[in-house]
Image (spheres, grey):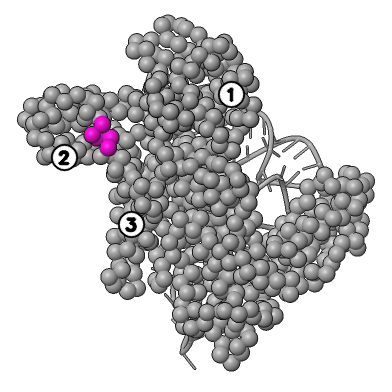
Amino acid sequence: MSVMLRKGVAERLQKYLDEVGQSGIRVEVTVPDRPEYGDFSSTIAFVLKAQLQQAPRAIAEEIVARIDKRPFERVEVVGPGFINFFLKPETVQQALREILAREHEYGRLTLGEGKRAQVEFVSANPTGPLTIGHCRQAVLGDVISRLLENAGYDVTREYYYNDAGRQMKLLGESVKARYLEILGQPTPFPEEGYHGEYIYEIASKIQESCGAGWAEASIVQFKEFAEAELFTEIKRTLSRLFRMPPERVFDLYYNESWLYAESLSAIDRAIAPVTNAKLLQWLRELGLAYEKDGALWFKATVLGRPQDRVLVKSQTGEPTYRLPDMAYHANKLLRGFDLMVDIFGADHQETYQDVLAALRALWEGGKLPKERAPDKIRVLIHQWVNLLRGGQPVKMSKRMATFVTIDELIDEIKQTVELADADSQGEALREDFAVNVVRTFILMRSADSHVNFDLDLAKKQSKDNPVYYVMYAYTRIKSIFDKSGETLESVVSLESLDTQEELALIKKLDEFPQVVRDATEHLAPHFLSVYVHELAGLLHDFYEKHRVIVEANPERMQARLALVRAVQIVLERAFGLLGLKAPARM
RNA sequence: GCGCCCGUAGCUCAGUUGGACAGAGCAGCGGUUUCCUAAACCGCAGGCCGUGCGUUCGAAUCGCACCGGGCGCACCA
């Protein structure tokens, strides 16, 4: 049997289909809920009913009679036509051998080999610290990037921000106002300015290094100073959350201003070949732009969208955010990626569809090369995280500075982590755990679900968090190896692995590559999180019922060490993909 | 009003190409430790899978309608 047990079953059914000339039928093999239905089950007989004009039960009997049954203890037809497969223990043991042979290559995919992918996420304008609102997509984007890398893609992690926009101007004005206030020259604070304490901190920093020297400085100077300060902080925050050096959290920070400049260097122009002006010209040529009330509009309605949108404002002649968004995405296509993933919050639901509609029209209208099809862009929309404190939702506004930052969240959880031995490593272990908790909380849920993050629960009852359950499985294995002093150098006999718990564990390990594949293809990290939780459960179950270190039976001990070693490998692989960090001890 | 997402156990959520009596964690009740860390394990209890109609041999899963919640529908991003 091949690497994957399920695949082996599927291959045998496929062979049968080929023989009866039904190769087009999709082979479905599932793991039944109940053990008496076998290790795997197929409903293929129901699907074939229509084609073969026979009763499903008879078809199932025919299939069972014809396929290669060597890997199976038995194959049964049950009820109206379910085919249930019961694996021989040797077959299952063989799967374990494959995992041990592949080691940390196990679960690596090839679907992205030789291809380039780009993942855009966070993309917050640097007008303040990152908040819980950004946390979900930061973690999702990080894990999706890791999954794509695991699949063989050359991945560019990208952060786009509107440095040319009104919000950044307001930031500059806010800092300048605070700066003058510190100098004792109070000026009116911008009506929609940023009220956060951090604005004062930035202003004092300027005052400390330049004194009153910036009193006549331009808004742009203040903006640029603040932007640099805030970006440093953002990178530092993400480096905690992603567990990477700050300089590696993103590969590219894409500035909106690149889409305006007509005189960029050759290198810059290579990643921004399409300017706003160029995009506008294309839309005009395709009859998708028109003037009304002094503004320039995008004719979205002819593309099936609910309403037309302004691209260039009447009063200032500046583009709205929509035009550079379109240009940015046209540039992404031209940069030659095979896959582009946009990760947006639910508030982008409406707007990204305009961008995609425009790109499709440009592509169909011949403005973009045939091989740069917009369907290479996949958009992942996630719902909001509702933060609960004292059972009440926390209302957040960035402008009014009533938000909880990612750093505050991690720090709050960190304080409550209890450790078995708080030695010199205590601080680092606490940080590891807090980040694990935050990431796990997000990664266990599908992006589609509106989740509640109960801060009190995450803090006060941190030992009950699912992350502990999973980490504890890992440390139990670690502890076994420490205790036994074994290193598992040579190939051992696996024949003694025949109990229900042992076989169940191996079968679960066998699912790993498929789970990784599903998580990657569906851009759904939570598939993997849920899997890890289930695997940990089976390890605990096994651990409670069987001892690994059994000196009286060296062969059995070696086999069980091999088994838990394989669990350890898969957990390490999964942790790597999910960005979790396992403690050596708990 | 229009668009997208959600509604599954007391709570937080899985259940992704429709399959056999619906799952996990937490909370509740009752057990398990001379033995590799009990942050674990075992058992009990808990659900008309928002409601109704439809498609199907078969629906939590697909379609339609309705009810309830979130987000959006700016010449802000």
Q: Residue at x 34, y 12 (%)?
A: A316
Instruction: Count neighbours of disc 3 (C-alpha within 10 A) and say few if under 14, some if 14 to 19, many if 20 or more.
Output: many
Q: Position of residue A559 (x, y in %)?
A: 62, 80
Q: CA distance from mark 1 to mark 2?
A: 47 Å
The reply, left or right, for residue A255 in relation to residue A505 is: left
Residue that label 2 marks? A205
Q: Position of residue B76 (x, y in %)?
A: 37, 23
Residue most extreme to the bottom: A552
The amino acid at mark 2 is Lys
Labels 1 and 2 in the same subunit: yes
Which residue lies at the image location 53% right of the left edge and 64% below the top edge?
A571
Q: Chain of mark 3?
A: A
Q: Quadrant of residue A30?
A: bottom right
Q: Are marks 1 and 3 on the same chain?
A: yes
> Vertical placement of A298 versus B45: above or below?
above
Q: Pinpoint the chain carrying mark 1.
A: A
Q: In the rendered structure, does residue A292 fall within the stretch colored magenta?
A: no
Which residue is the site of mark 1? Answer: A368
A133 left or right of B61? left
Q: Secondary structure at mark 1?
A: loop
> In this rendering, would A187 be left or right of A97?
left
Q: Main secondary structure of the magenta part?
A: helix
Left or right of residue A496: residue A196: left
Q: Amino acid at mark 1?
A: Leu
Q: Are marks 1 and 2 in contact (CB under 8 Å)?
A: no
x and y percent of residue A98 in the render?
66, 68
Magenta residues span A224-228
* Residue pointed to by mark 3: A413
Task: For the C terminus of chain A, give its image quadrant.
Answer: bottom left
